[in-house]
Amino acid sequence: MNTRVAAIAVLVAFLAGMVFATFSELRVFLPALLRGALITIEVAALSFLLMTASAFTAGVARLSPWWSVRWIATAYVEVFRGTSLLVQLFWFFFVLPEFGLTLSPMAAGVLGVGFNFGAYGAEIVRGAITAVPRGQWEAAAALNLPVFRRMTRIVLPQALVVVIPPFGNLTIEMVKATSVVSAVTLVDITYASVQQNQLHYRTVEIFVVTLFLYYCFSQLIRFSMGLLEERSKRHLAATR
Amino acid sequence: MTEPRIKFENVCKRYGPLTVLDGLNMEVAAGELVTIIGPSGSGKTTVLRVLMTLETIEEGLITIDGEPFNKMRSREGGLVPASTAHLRRIRARIGMVFQNFNLFPHMTALGNCIEAPIHSLGLSKAEAVGRAEELLDMVGLSDKRDHYPSQLSGGQQQRVAIARALAMRPEILLFDEPTSALDPEMVDEVLQVIRQLATEHSYTMLLVTHQMGFAREVSGRVCFFDGGKFLEEGPPREFFASPRHERTRQFLNKVLAAH
């Protein structure tokens, strides 16, 4: 792990040096790109919260003993997974106002990205829960734990080990997909770089910096998910 | 006349076309230790699983101390399907030990033993820990309280599982082939704990096992289960010395020859 951190640090320093040495008009476009990066971070962070909440809610609900709850969760997953993210954003931003509900660009962006990726996350959570051995449910039932506690104390902590790696991948996908929010007028990094390119025509420099910023986000997520994974399976590995 | 602690009346359990319990009748007195033996796959484990409410039954009535368990009395006095609250109230009197231990792998030995007392009985943490430490000491594992299941041997895991079941202070204990998943050298340490429970405490115990020697030694009664019902039962000495039923004789010859 440490060698990788070191390698990334060296790469960052090297690229930063390159940028300062060769990108003469950096100070012209960089501030705008960084403002865009802040918007991307904001959308991604809020979407992550919404995605996690809806993934766990819908994932658990799809295994509910009540058919109505199962049905609602399945409908959610099918609709958001089965249609285009961009069109979903348009619905939140352009169509809902037709029905009297006007959302800010940020709200529409977060709802679209969060619910869309939450639908994929729900399938991960559902699969992980069904992968917990039946004996665990039975032991919890035999100990007379209430159904809710069986889920939160016994099954979900074990499912989490299986959830985290694919959830990390999904989060990286999600961060990269936040670039669609430019379609609802948010000036995120992608949109900011398009704007700066039109103003300054420093095409190579601008898009190298943009890619690099996305890459940094992905690495950050990979790194933190790796830590979480280590933590969650500290005691579980040997019993599986 | 006192009610039996456990009573099965005409209990039927089917999986599709397969009948596992076929009009089963059984009575177990308070404090009695009954061993259930029978061929593999005959469904003897189902008797315990039905009693633990891990399986539902299609027909019949199970009562605990005369009180309906799988059903409950309605206000008019008739029997209706039991509510979740009713099941939880009666189930609190039963504890179960599984063939594969089923310890919670993300909790220490102590954590396993205090989880249900805290979250099901509502004990304070200090109370639950005190109770769990006593029980871990009883099964000879007080030095392993902070070990996770993955750090324990099979025999140790099963002893923790017994302590975990006892921590709920049940009156009835169900043992589902508690030594079948163990390496031979670990069987004795688990049997020793069960022996101690049988002789020093007043639990009502149902034991499904293939350990014939142990069954003969500790049980008050041995039941031979095959084809969805009990074919034959009796005190262990008579049961093993002179089985009446042909099927029982065949089964005993087979398992005893294997030893």
Image: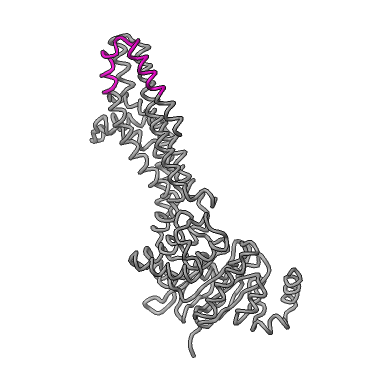
Seen from the viewer's position, the closer of residues B145 and B43 is: B145
- Quadrant that contains the C terminus of chain B: bottom right
Q: Is residue A25 magenta?
A: yes
- In the image, residue A169 lies at what x, y percent? 45, 34
* Residue A18 placement: quadrant: top left
- In the image, residue A12 lies at what x, y percent? 38, 22
Residue A118 in view (yes/no): yes
- In the image, residue B232 lies at what x, y percent? 67, 79
Seen from the viewer's position, the closer of residues A119 and B138 is: B138
**With B158 as the anchor, is A229 left or right in this view?**
left
Residue B81 in view (yes/no): no
**With A197 as the anchor, is B108 left or right in this view?**
right
**With A236 as the anchor, is B121 left or right in this view?**
left
- In the image, residue A64 lies at what x, y percent? 43, 53
Check the image and report above or below for A136 versus A208: below
What residue sits 40% from the left and 70% below the top? B131
Check the image and report above or below for A228 versus A25: below
Magenta part of the chain: A10-35
What residue sits 28% from the left and 30% below the top? A93
Q: Residue furthest bottom?
A: B1
Q: Main secondary structure of the magenta part?
A: helix
Q: Is residue B171 magenta?
A: no
Seen from the viewer's position, the closer of residues B12 and B150 is: B150
What residue sits 53% from the left and 69% below the top? B50
